[in-house]
Structure formats: C-alpha cells, structure tokens
Image: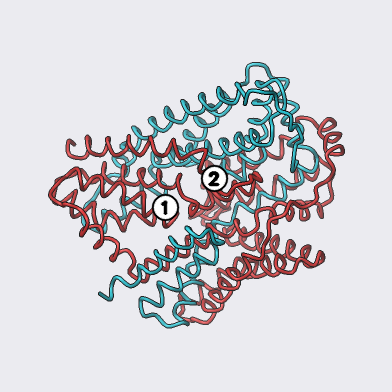
Amino acid sequence: MLKIEHAYWLIALFLAGAAWLNLRDRRWSHAAFWLVLAGLIGGGGYVTRASANHGGLPAQLAGVGVIALAVLSPRMKRRHLVERDAAAREVDAKRLGHRLFGPALLIPLVTLLVALFGSYTVVGDWHLFDKTRTTLTGLALACVVALVAALRVTRARPADGLSEGRRLLDTLGWAALLPLTLAALGGVFAATGVGAAVSDLVRMLIPVQSALACVVAYGLGMVLFTMIMGNAFAAFPVLTAGVGLPLLVQAHGANPAILGSLGMLTGYCGTLFTPMAANFNIVPVALLELPNQNDVIRAQWKTGALLLVVNLALMYVLVFRF
Amino acid sequence: MMHWLPLVGVAVVVIGFALRLNPVPVVVAAGVASGLAAGKSVPEILALLGNSFVSERALLLFVLTLPAIGVLERAGLREHVSNWITTLRGLTLSRLLIAYLAARQILAMLGLIDVAGQAQTVRPLLAPMAEAAAAQQRGGPLDAEERNDVRAFSAATDNVGRFFGEDVFIALGAVLLIQGFYSQHGIELEPLHIALWALPTAIAAFVIHAIRTVLFAKRLERGRGTPATDTTQAAD
C-alpha cells in the first residue's frame, strides 16, 4: 500500500541529497538546514507515535531541530544558482518541442486520476492508496512518474534530477519552511490559550447590542486574525466561538450555516493580504524569482479588499433573513 | 490578568513583521514566548513545537515537484512555452488568465485542490505562458518590471481561484471544519447547506478578479510610453 508516510521518506531523501550537494559546494548553512529538515520530515512518523505512547524525548528533540532551523534561516542567502546556458536550452527546446509538456502535465493528471479513482483500487482489505490522504499520496506518486518521464524525454541522467531539484530548492531557501512553521505556531497558540484571550478582547471593544457592529467585528476579526496567523482555519474556531456564536447566532439570531460559510470566506480575503500565508504569498515570490517579498500580495490585495466588502454586505443581508 | 499573557506570542509576530525580520525565527520565537507566558516548562515547549511541526509535514509535499520541473527547465521548457505561445493567434493575456481562473475554481469546487498550484502549474506553465502572451500583445519583449508584474499577477490568479472555489466543495477542509465546530457546540448542520452559501462569494470573486485581469492586461498593452529599452531577460 502506498502511504503518505512513503512520500515523507521520499522528501527526506531528496532533502538529504540537496544537503550533500551543498556540502560539496561548501555551503555549510544550506547543507545543515536541509539535513536537519530531512531528519524532521523522515522521522516525523516516529515522533508522532512516540508521543502517543507518552515518550516525550523524540518530540523534544524535534523541537530542538525546529529551533536549529530557525537559527539557520537568516544565514540562507537567496542566490540564483548557475543554470545550463540559455543557448543549449533553446536548442533542446527546438528539438523536443511539445514533448516537454508531457511530463509537466503528468503531475496534475496523475494526481487527478488518483484523486478520482484511487479509492476504487481495492482488493479485499488491501488498498493501493492511503485511505485518508488519497489526493496527497497521488500528488507524490505523480511527481515520481513525472520525473521518470522527464528523464526519458530529455535523456537527462537521474543525477540531473537531484541537481536540478536542488537548484530550485535552494532558490526557495527558507521560504519552503515557512508554511510548516506557521502551522506549527497555530498548534502552539491553541495549546497556550491565545484563542480565549483574543475573544475576550474583541468582546470588550464592540457595542454588542448592534447587529451590524457584531457582523463587522466578526468579519474584520477573521481578516485580522487570519493575517496574523496566516491561516483562516486557525482564525475560524477562535473568532466563531468568541464572537460569531454568542453574539451573532445566540443574541441576534443569525443563521449558523451562512455565518460559518461567509465567515470562513472573509478570512480567506485576509489570506490574500498577509506574508504570513507563506505558501500562497511568499513561496511563489521565491519560485518566480520576484525581487520584492510582497510582489504577489501587491498583485492581489485589491481583489481581496473588494471581495471583503462584498462578503460583509452578503453577511449582513443574508444571515438574519434565512 | 494571567490569561492575557499568551498574547505576547501574537505581539512577537506583529513586531517581527513590522521590523521585516526573517519570518522563520520570528514565528518560532513567538511560539516559545507564548509557551513561556502560559507557564510551560522548556521541555514542554520543545515537545509542543516538535509535535506541532511534524504533524504538519504534508505542507512540504510540493518540494517533490521540483526535480521533474528542474529537469524539464534544463531542457528548455520555459523557452519552448514562450516560443509556442507566440505562434498562437487570439490567445491574449487576459483570456489565458481568466480561463485559468475559471478552471482553477471549478477544480477546487470538485475537491481537486492540489492538482494545480504555485509549484505544480504556475512556475512551469502559467507564468511562462502569461509572459509570452503579454510580450506578443505588446509586440516586443517585456522589461524586467513588466515581466515581474505578469508573474506576480499569475500567482495571484492561482490564489484567488483556489481560495474561492475550495469552500464550495463539501467533503474537504473548510466545510468539514465549520460543520465540526458547530457540532461541538451543539448545532447540527448539513455540509451541503454550508457549501451552497459559499457560491455567491465564489461568483463575486470570479467577476471581480476577471475585471481586474482585463484592466491589468490593458494597462500592460499600453506599456509605459516608450518601447522597452531593457530587454535583457535578467535572471533567465
């Protein structure tokens, strides 16, 4: 059976390979960074199982690893690594033509096939794909299939797969890590009672007898907290338990289904404004080699702002009517 | 008074942000600060950090796309995309981006979120296609600033399509989180009801971003007055 855990081992292998190439180039910080990360990703399953059995030491070691990554991050200077020269690429492009699209399109295509039909590849109790994370397992499989196809089409050596992958990985640098770190922060905040404190604060600040004030406070609270956490999923339980449920649903009779749906979508508007939503706003800056960290946010914040106004209006008009 | 203390973590994030420090140490420091403020011991905080970190490993899956994309780029994928687009008549920047937006929203509505993405589709395909389409419309190569604007707008289009399609799908993430939250608080809802109320916003997002795309493409086509003098394809 293909499990998501296998994909994590594959990532760890790739990261360790990138660390080794950096070691050869005497780029010590990069090498150490990818090596520690490889350990955390590859050993993650062991850490989780040990914690479930009340073994705290692996989790504490993982915590030390996270701190080591944080210390190494500022030393990861982003630099454009040497590529194959443009003339040689142009010659290959002319020769290979549309065949270059095949492997690139295999990534979404294989993922799609596994997402749609993966759950049917069952013999008795035996499942070909992890039942809980079929699409993501499919994505990992698709990447392997695409790499094999890319190597065949371009007649490149397997070692090129590692060195080209490492070129892109080093281009990303610490930005690759930020989404994970932020998600981890969400877990820490939940465990330390940050949510309860925030909701008390909101209730102190607004006139709770006005339905409009509550709608605006809920919507803007979602946006603000999403911007700080970089994630609307983290903001939703905090703001809905603190403001949405007691003040809007219980006190003003709002429809919970509509409120929940529009509340989450209002949080998504906040995702478009914040560098903390790293996988959407910072990772592409690195991937597309843009000069300014906020270039993607600058391109999308107006869509988010207009949509925020639309959402607040929809919320005020709809939640008290249905 | 004690229960306000963990907010120190939020303050660390905001201050680190404002000072433009490297975000990774800022975020880790925020976690440590909020743990200390909540009265946890150092080993407890380390274990909390470690456990939270490894349980979110799925967020790093996108790096698996890099070797395949790197190999194709080495063999001229970006060059081929741009040669090819210039031979297509009628494919304008705005048509390309709006078609991608619609496809992304519809796929996300069907729950197919990780099929496309910044690493999967924007870097290898959408961004080079958009650059080539823009250059063709301009009748000349883009300067570095225009090229960066087109790339950033392509990334933004992927984000908008993903976010405002995802919530309409019933069996995934957002809707189940909403239903689960209310169920914990004694309110039982049908996932379908939650998902349907995301439709008006999905439509509004499409209309707003499509209009902005058309305006962006028009502005780019008009150019910045004089033809681009800086035609070096910097970086590439």
Q: Amino acid at mark 1?
A: Met
Disc 2 residue crowd, few under 14, some 14–19, many 20+, Cα 10 Å: many
Residue B226 picture location, percent across and down = 67, 23
Q: Is residue A269 above or below residue B42?
A: above
Q: Amino acid at mark 2?
A: Asp
Name the residue tied to disc 2: B114
Of the 4 image quadrants, the one containing the N terminus of chain B is bottom left
Disc 1 residue crowd, few under 14, some 14–19, many 20+, Cα 10 Å: many
- Identity of the residue drawn at 52% across and 45% down: A120
Of the 4 image quadrants, the one containing the C terminus of chain B is top right
Report the chain shown in red.
Answer: A
Name the residue tied to disc 1: A227
Q: Is residue A220 above or below residue A319?
A: below
Q: Nearer the viewer, residue A37 or A123?
A: A37
Q: Nearer the viewer, mark 1 or mark 2?
A: 1
Q: Quadrant of residue A20?
A: bottom right
Kind of element beneath mark 2: loop
